[in-house]
Image: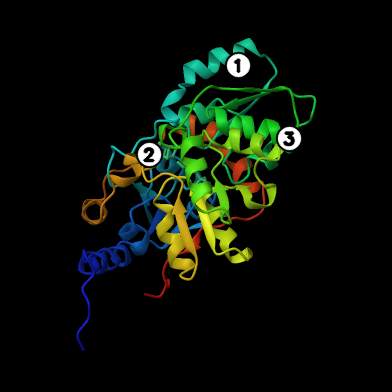
Amino acid sequence: MATTAAPTDFGALQQEIRALAKAKHAVILAHNYERAEIQDVADYVGDSLGLSREAAKTDADVIVFCGVHFMAETAAILSPTKTVLLPDLAAGCSLADTITADQLKAWKAEHPGAVVVSYVNTSAAVKAESDWCCTSGNAIEVINAIPAEKEILFLPDMFLGAHVRRVSGRQNIHVWMGECHVHAGIDPEHINAQRAAHPGAEFLIHPECGCATPAIEAVSAGAISADGVHILSTEGMIQRPAKSDNDTFIIATEVGILHRLRKANPTKTFIPASDHAVCAFMKVTTLAKVKRALETMSHRITVPADVAARAKQALDRMVSVGASKAAAPARDPGE
Ligand code: 13P
Ligand code: SF4
């Protein structure tokens, strides 16, 4: 029977990768922002929290992390006996780069006794200087778990920091002024244009977005209906359409997430708030690099034992807090 070839046929490479993963007892984890063909070859696709939980519980010998460097470091800390591979070492994160361990030490010295909450988008060295880690999926729960009278240093994302301050109502949260260049670039102009073009659509915003604060202010001012606006982690966005009667959604985050949203909800329409919201760090991982990673067992990500031990305490707290938002099996594990 004749079949229509996909514009780019990744099938053969994906089959080779699956065979290699089986032979090497490897699990392939992919973030929601990865290329579509990477998501499709992965065992699990999810947000930072779900992938951390998968990394912590896997019984595979090898974890191929299709995401960015801090995520692979997190997997190495949570699963120290596993071999963790990052297919391309250029997969960094502009947000994680906004604070170093020395800068955090200096900030802590200015606020003795404060509790340090680090977003998971940080280096292992920064996590080692932190009391708690959180992701966008459980940041509020983490803040609520800290006694109300305690001062908090929240880092490094200023928009997520503003969001947790607003939702928790706490005034004693100091926020580091870091930002992700991809999310900060989704500005209110993009949002206003898309909302005007699709007035009935639900509006799903990642809390790292520069537009999250004005959007919520517009809700408070009555300019936008609160019913249609949801501030969610990437996994929260994935789960939202199935719970909603709406059939059109404007998505304010990195565009890689559209693949999974459309795959899971073929009858619904997903519109990117900005077509330009592309994380180049997430896109450096290609199928050819995943195959090479499995063939050569590189690039291995390790964390010095003393740093890992301190960072693990903060990560263990993160993994244990918040409603379960586990990563989704991307394919039948028996395939
Ligand atoms: P989540 O997947 O945890 O929502 O985070 C998004 C992100 O920017 C990861 O780099
Ligand atoms: Fe980092 Fe932003 Fe890319 Fe996420 S989207 S990995 S925060 S640079």
Disc on the earlier residue, 2 or 3:
2
Q: Which residue is mark 1?
A: 108
Disc on the earlier residue, 2 or 1:
2
Q: Is there CB contact under 8 Å for labels 3 and 1? A: no
**Mark-to-mark CA distance, 3 and 1:** 22 Å
The answer to which of 80 and 164 lies nearer the viewer is: 164
Disc on the earlier residue, 3 or 1:
1
Side of 132 where 197 appears, left or right: left
What's the mark number on residue 69?
2
Write the residue at 59% across / 66% down: 242
Quarter of the image with the C terminus in it: bottom left
Could you tell me the amino acid type at mark 3?
Ser
Q: Which residue is mark 3?
A: 168
Assign a secondary structure to mark 1.
helix
Side of 162 where 254 appears, left or right: left
Assign a secondary structure to mark 2.
helix
Q: Is there CB contact under 8 Å for labels 2 and 1? A: no
* Residue 143 lies in quadrant: top right
Image height check: is 109 above or below 258? above
Could you tell me the amino acid type at mark 1?
Lys
Q: Position of residue 276 (x, y in %)?
A: 36, 42
Assign a secondary structure to mark 3.
helix
